[in-house]
Image: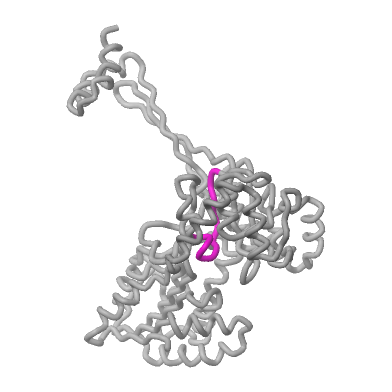
Amino acid sequence: MMLRLRSADADFAARFAALVADTREPDRGVSGQVAAILERVRKEGFAAVAELTQRFDRVELTAGSAEVGRAERDAAVARVPAEARAALELAAARIRAFHEVQRPADGEHADATGVRAGWRWTAVERAGLYVPGGRAAYPSSVLMNAIPAQVAGVDELVMVMPTPDGRLNPLAMLAADLAGVSRIFRIGGAQAIAALAYGTAPVPKCDMIVGPGNAWVAEAKRQLYGTVGIDMVAGPSEILVIADASARPDWIAADLLSQAEHDPVAQSILITDSPTLADAVADWVERLLPALSTGEAARESWDNYGAIILVRDLAEAAPLANALAAEHLELMLADPKPLFEVVRHAGSIFLGAHTPEPVGDYIGGPNHVLPTGRRARFSGGLGVHNFLKRTTWLEAGADGFAALAHATATLADAEGLPAHALSIRIRARG
């Protein structure tokens, strides 16, 4: 049954702490299975990728058929209805506009000694984009993964996407074109992540891998971090709604279910100071669930991981929200700004009753690839910066070197590194 908590109860702190601690992370039992897949791909190359793809996705691949060719992409794009095309084009334009202002500027400064120092930003050369294709195919994820990389200046974007039973999603192909994806491979799972990380012809080796996936994909990214850069280790979806009595309970219920339908281990939580609203939302969830085609997953998520927290005053909401550090935070309040100013930890925040989270999933502009599992305490969503590296530089002329030489050699001596000191003194001697 869905969890009900009251901040006035004596055991609230302990029960809330247990809720925060349960991040619904996948069973690390998959760790060994993923390690075995990665090792197979590392040793056997594409042969292992092909065998695993046939086993899991029921698609027979050869090195020549793994890539989705230009003609096949064009044929799929031609099947996209005009209305869907227009919606996706609008989403791409809005996402691009939001991310174009994110690129940081290069900079430098000079000190009194004449030493110049600075930094510059350069993009990775090739990025791998993982797009889920299991429970559903998400063209929105193509846009969210690829557009920031393209804006950052990545030379080549390589997309992998499972195609169970060989089905190719036309909208995903259109999204790939809109976002500048160079190559697409019909592979998924941990084996796809390994192929991108190691390079298994015809799949090229990538410098960075981004994008959400299932437990095996997340674990593969975690294990391969260091061999390749990653955006984050993503877990099940989350939404936290903070609402006052002004909010409509049917709207809140729909928003909670918008995340519950993603996955049986997704989590939807409501915090409110209104007992009437709390009861009405619970009732509306039960009324809306039966009509959902995704109702089975949503029901399991809501019953096992959903929660309604009744607080005495909404002043209590901010520390609770910060502890939960939710992927998505909706502030369905008559005036959301005061709470917005004091919440520090959330992947993305949606202000006001007319800003439901699904707008952010598709067309709002900010990225929907966001930290889960309380990781919003220390990380943020995918953006242009994920595809950039900051390189610092230093230039000291003769006068600048002379001003720094003695202190540098002194510190090298203190750390017991004589060659460091020699590098300085050999120059100081002229």
Tell me: 144 left or right of 413: right
At 77% across and 51% down in the image, what residue appears? 69
At 62% across and 40% down in the image, what residue appears? 155
Q: Position of residue 70 (x, y in %)?
A: 78, 50
Question: In the orientation shown, which residue stands out farthest toward the top?
Answer: 430
Q: Is residue 92 above or below residue 290?
A: above
Coloring applied to the structure: one colour
Q: Position of residue 143 (x, y in %)?
A: 62, 57
Whether the magenta-drawn stretch holds residue 208 is answered as yes
Residue 349 visible in image: no
At 31% across and 19% down in the image, what residue appears? 400
Give residue 59's quadrant in the image.
bottom right
Magenta stretch in the rendered image: 207-218
Given residues 349 and 3, the one toward you in this image is 3
Given residues 405 and 39, the one toward you in this image is 39
Q: Is residue 142 above or below residue 333?
A: above
Quarter containing the C terminus: top left
Quarter containing the N terminus: bottom left
Residue 240 visible in image: yes
Tell me: 192 left or right of 424: right
Question: In the orientation shown, which residue stands out farthest toward the left?
Answer: 414
Q: Position of residue 18 (x, y in %)?
A: 31, 76
